[in-house]
Amino acid sequence: MSLPVRVSIVEVGPRDGLQNEKVTLSPQIRAELISRLAAAGLSRIEAGSFVSPKAVPQMAHTDATLALVVRDNLRLSVLAPNLRGLAAALSAGADEIAVFAAASETFSKRNIHCSIEESLARYAEVVAEARRYGVMARGYISCVLGCPYEGEIDSGRVVSVASALLEMGCFEVSLGDTIGVGAPLQARRMVERVARVAPLDKIAVHFHDTYGQALANIFACLEVGVCVVDSSVAGLGGCPFAPGAAGNVATEDVVYMLERMDVETGVSLDRLLAAGAFACRELKRAPASRVAQAYAARCGGRAETPLGG
């Protein structure tokens, strides 16, 4: 068995997590969460989104959130789905932008109201303009292992979209199991196929834990050579296409697993648990992280207390 020596974690809680929470947090609280995550050692953080606040009210005032965060050794990424969003991201001083495509035609049309081909043409303009200003662009692909409308997805479609995103200038492509239906062997085969057209260092994985398979899927992809993993502190965010089910894999759970396998992350689990506890207090919800739950039970609910022996 071969695993990476170090894994880079992309923290998506302040964007992908919070946008699916019922409670809308103020820019000040969102900035405080980002600062706590940075203090835990996370250097790549999705900070927000420049989409219509009518569509995603949880992401309103992302510019104010970014203005409140100290940027030392920190890369803040924002979703910029069009040229208007990019202009707002550039004005706010985002370090990186992200664009979202899908491997499912039906999902693309229902989620962003255009075909896959149309979305890629739009993103090509956004990415080119971002690069003109020296801002890197990351590409996301939704529904890589299954779609709520079309069912199982042919990995050939994932390869096609990944190729297009890389060709337009995205420095990295994140493969998202949006509804969390994938299992390890399926995930591994999908990544292996994408790796035929994309270097492994340009591939990230983004798993939801709807059926409890996220950690197993991540492990399977690490064995292939993937070394970038998206996750959300406290497992923030639901799964809108599977009501009542878990959403993003929890960063605490990913860090715990990697630490136990002697894979470096640069993240302090103690500080990460504290950041997750802070977020959950503000959201008035319990953490979805199994590590956070186990530790709270062990410490009488004091999630901020160091792990100790």
Image (tube, rainbow, N blue to C red):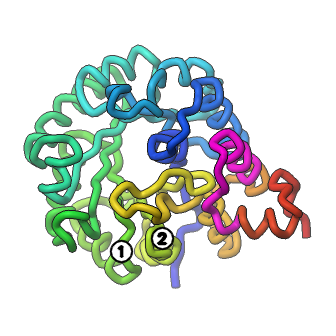
Could you tell me which quadrant the C terminus lies in? Answer: bottom right
Q: Magenta stretch: give its range.
A: 272-291
Q: Indicate yes or no whether the magenta region holds residue 46.
A: no
- The percent coordinates of residue 292 (x first, y second) are 72, 62
Which residue: 29% across, 40% down?
Answer: 99
Which residue: 51% across, 34% down?
Answer: 47
Q: Looking at the image, is 216 positioned above or below residue 286?
A: below
Which residue: 53% across, 18% down?
Answer: 64
- Disc 2 on helix, strand or loop? helix
Q: Which mark is residue 182?
A: 1
User: Residue at label 2?
Assistant: 214
Q: Which mark is residue 251?
A: none
- Disc 1 on helix, strand or loop? loop
Residue 83 in sight here: yes
Name which residue type carries label 2: Ala
Q: Looking at the image, is 266 positioned above or below residue 256?
A: above
